[in-house]
Image (spheres, rainbow, N blue to C red):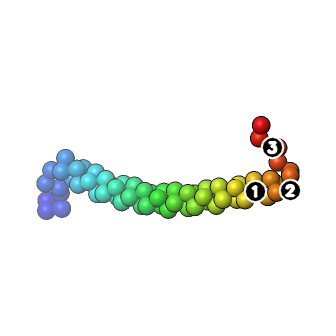
């Protein structure tokens, strides 16, 4: 009888608690990963913005761009 759980509800609650802890850890890891992705994407966007400015300047100097009215 020592091997039998004291209370079946408590046994299930403990299992649920352990699973919830794993879910919380997984969500934390996902948040950290997404932060890295967002920071990387922001860096790419900054580089693209700078490239766009440079291309615009080159096009103006070569008279390839339409002149604003």
Q: Which residue does the image show at 57% across and 57% down from the upper left?
A: 41
Q: Position of residue 61 (x, y in %)?
A: 82, 57
Give the image quarter of residue 15: bottom left
Task: Tell which of 42 and 6 is nearer to you.
Answer: 42
Residue pointed to by mark 1: 57
The crowding category of the residue bearing disc 3, from other C-alpha atoms within 10 Å (few below 14, some 14 to 19, many at least 20), is few
Between the C-alphas of marks 1 and 3, the distance is 12 Å
As displayed, is residue 37 above or below residue 9?
below
Q: Which mark is residue 45?
A: none
Q: Is residue 26 visible?
A: no
Disc nearer the start of the sequence (2/1): 1
Give the image quarter of residue 26: bottom left
Label 2 sits on a secondary structure element that is loop
Q: In the rendered image, which quarter contains the C terminus? A: top right
Disc nearer the start of the sequence (1/3): 1
Q: Residue furthest right?
A: 63
Task: Tell which of 23 and 14 is nearer to you.
Answer: 23
Disc nearer the start of the sequence (3/2): 2
Q: Are marks 3 and 2 in contact (CB under 8 Å)?
A: no
Label 3 sits on a secondary structure element that is loop
Q: In the rendered image, which quarter contains the N terminus? A: bottom left
Residue pointed to by mark 3: 67
Label 1 sits on a secondary structure element that is helix
Residue pointed to by mark 2: 62
Q: Which residue does the image show at 38% across and 58% down from the upper left?
A: 28
Q: Is residue 42 visible?
A: yes
The crowding category of the residue bearing disc 1, from other C-alpha atoms within 10 Å (few below 14, some 14 to 19, many at least 20), is some
- Residue 21 falls left or right of residue 65: left
């Amino acid at each position: 009888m020592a091997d039998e759980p004291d209370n079946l509800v408590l046994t299930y609650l403990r299992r649920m608690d352990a699973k919830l802890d794993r879910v919380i850890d997984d969500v934390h890891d996902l948040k950290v990963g997404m932060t890295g992705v967002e920071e990387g994407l922001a860096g790419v966007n900054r580089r693209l913005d700078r490239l766009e400015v440079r291309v615009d300047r080159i096009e103006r100097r070569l008279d390839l761009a339409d002149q604003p009215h």
